[in-house]
Amino acid sequence: MTDYINFVKAQLKDWKVAVLTLVLTVARILFGYAWITAGFEKATTWLSDGKLNSIGLVKGMVNNLAAAGHPDPLGITHWYGWVANVLFVNTMPALTDVMVVIFEIGCGLFFLLGFKVFWAGLVALFMNLQFMAAGSYNNFGYIWTDLALAKFAKYAELIGVSGYLASKKNNGLATGAQQAAK
């Protein structure tokens, strides 16, 4: 643990790194808590009422994606709307509710623990873009936070599990280099 603390201290000597690390660590912890809370709220309501709750959101997203007049030169919007309709609406609507809960709680745990923040941010961004496409525009702040945490993940996770693992990796490399020099 001393190696980890020394590793973090060495990183925080640069005031810019220290500020980014502090701000992003607090943000990721609050963000992680929000994701876990959202996941557990859905778990207690969506998974216990016997309804397919996400199906309305997915249908709204498919309708919004299929709306005429939107330029889509590569056909990605049309293709994704078709995939969402076939997979999430027609093939596995009950599994979609479960997947939303699992991914929200999973993203929250990864953010809270400071583990693989880039990947958690990417998954969270994907989910928030889908929520936004379904008409839930209150996710705008979440999207910016997803992007910031993914872009600056190494600072956001310095004080977290990934930072601890990086210190172990760097310490092992330094020890190996020092032994090779002898």
Image: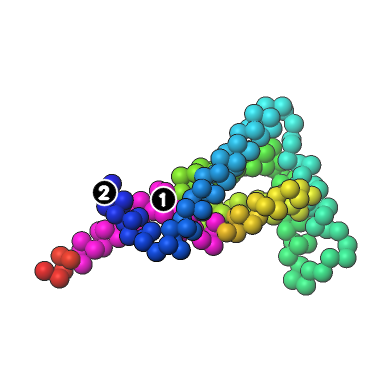
Magenta stretch, main secondary structure, is helix
The span picked out in magenta is: 149-177
Q: Where residue 52 sits in the image (x, y, percent)? A: 74, 35
Compared to residue 3, the image places residue 170 above or below, namely below
* Residue 75 figure quarter: bottom right
Q: Position of residue 152 (x, y in %)?
A: 51, 61
Disc 2 element: helix
Crowd around label 2: few <14 · some 14–19 · many ≥20 (10 Å): few
Whether residue 130 is visible here, answered yes or no, is no
Label 1 residue SS: loop
Looking at the image, which is closer to me, 173 or 16?
A: 16
**Whole-percent x and y of residue 4?**
31, 51
Real-space Cα distance between discs 1 and 2?
14 Å
Q: Residue at x 76, y 54 (%)?
A: 133
Work out whether residue 63 or residue 162 is closer to the camera in this orientation and state it.
Answer: 162
In the rendered structure, find residue 179 and report the number of the disc placed on it: none
Judge left or right: residue 80 versus residue 116.
right
Three-letter code for the amino acid on which mark 2 is drawn: Thr
Apparent side of residue 135 relative to residue 3 in the rendered image (left or right): right
Q: In the figure, 99 relative to 85: above or below?
A: above
Count of numbered circles in the view: 2
User: Is there CB contact under 8 Å for labels 1 and 2?
Assistant: no
User: Which residue appears at 70% of the width and 50% of the height?
Assistant: 139
Report the coloring of the rendering. rainbow
123 and 62: which is toward the camera: 123
Q: Which residue is mark 2?
A: 2
The residue singled out by tag 1 in the image is: 159
Q: Amino acid at mark 1?
A: Ile
As for residue 165 lying within the magenta part, the answer is yes
